[in-house]
Image (spheres, rainbow, N blue to C red):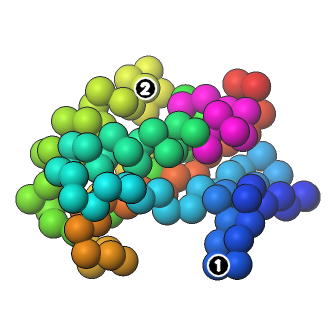
């Protein structure tokens, strides 16, 4: 089984692919002053970019973990998520409240996806 790292850096890789499974690093927003809706859009755009780079499609995403710094943002995150998610092939998902790495960060998401299915 082969292991490939996408954009490895000194601390982490953008994604690690093992065989036909890709583990995406946590995706975070760029604008830490934005509201939950905009931060969620930024994170999902980054997920889309990694998925595309790996030659896959949104339907290949198997699971997503959503981390919120404040569970009061759950509805705001879901409003953006619902517009983004593939309704025909939604991933498994879990959402939890956690202390995130930087002040102002409201959301972080990590994903696991299959490779090769829709290439």
Relative side of 66 to 62, left or right: left
Residue 94's disc number: none
Q: Extreme top residue here? A: 88
Q: Secondary structure at mark 2?
A: loop
Q: Is residue 78 above or below residue 29?
A: above
For mark 2, does the 10 Å Cα neighbourhood hold few (<14), some (14 to 19), or many (20 or more) residues?
Answer: some
Query: At 49% across and 62% down in the image, what residue appears?
Result: 26
In the rendered view of the protein, which quadrant contains the N terminus? bottom right
Secondary structure state at the residue bearing disc 1:
loop
Q: In 3D space, how far apart are the residues under numbered discs 1 and 2 (Cα atoms)?
A: 31 Å
Whether residue 42 is visible: yes
Name above or below for residue 97 compared with residue 82. below
Near-viewer residue (31 or 79): 31
Q: Residue 91: in sight, yes or no? A: no
Dot 1: within a 10 Å radius of its alpha carbon, few (fewer than 14), some, or many (20 or more) residues?
A: few
In the image, farthest residue toward the left:
72
Q: Position of residue 79 (x, y in %)?
A: 19, 36
Q: Quadrant of residue 5?
A: bottom right
**Residue lying at 31% horizontally and 55% vertically, measured from the top left:** 31
Residue 36 left/right relative to 12: left
The mark nearer the N terminus, 1 or 2, is 1
Q: Residue at 59%, 56% (x, y): give it.
A: 24
Q: In which quarter of the view is residue 69 placed?
A: bottom left
Q: Is residue 75 magenta?
A: no
The image position of residue 78, as x and y in percent, is 22, 41
Extreme-right residue of the structure: 1
Q: Which residue is mark 2?
A: 86
Name the quarter where the C terminus is drawn. top right
Q: Which residue is mark 1?
A: 11
Report the span colored magenta: 50-58
Give coordinates of residue 39: x percent, y percent. 29, 50
């Amino acid at each position: 089984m082969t292991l490939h790292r996408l954009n490895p850096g000194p601390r982490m890789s953008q994604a690690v692919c093992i065989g036909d499974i890709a583990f995406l690093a946590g995706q975070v927003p760029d604008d830490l002053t934005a509201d939950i809706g905009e931060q969620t859009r930024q994170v999902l755009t980054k997920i889309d970019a990694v998925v595309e780079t790996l030659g896959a499609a949104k339907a290949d995403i198997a699971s997503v973990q959503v981390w919120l710094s404040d569970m009061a943002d759950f509805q705001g995150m879901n409003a953006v998520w619902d517009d983004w998610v593939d309704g025909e092939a939604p991933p498994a998902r879990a959402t939890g409240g956690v202390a995130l790495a930087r002040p102002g960060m409201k959301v972080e998401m990590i994903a696991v996806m299959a490779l090769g299915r829709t290439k």
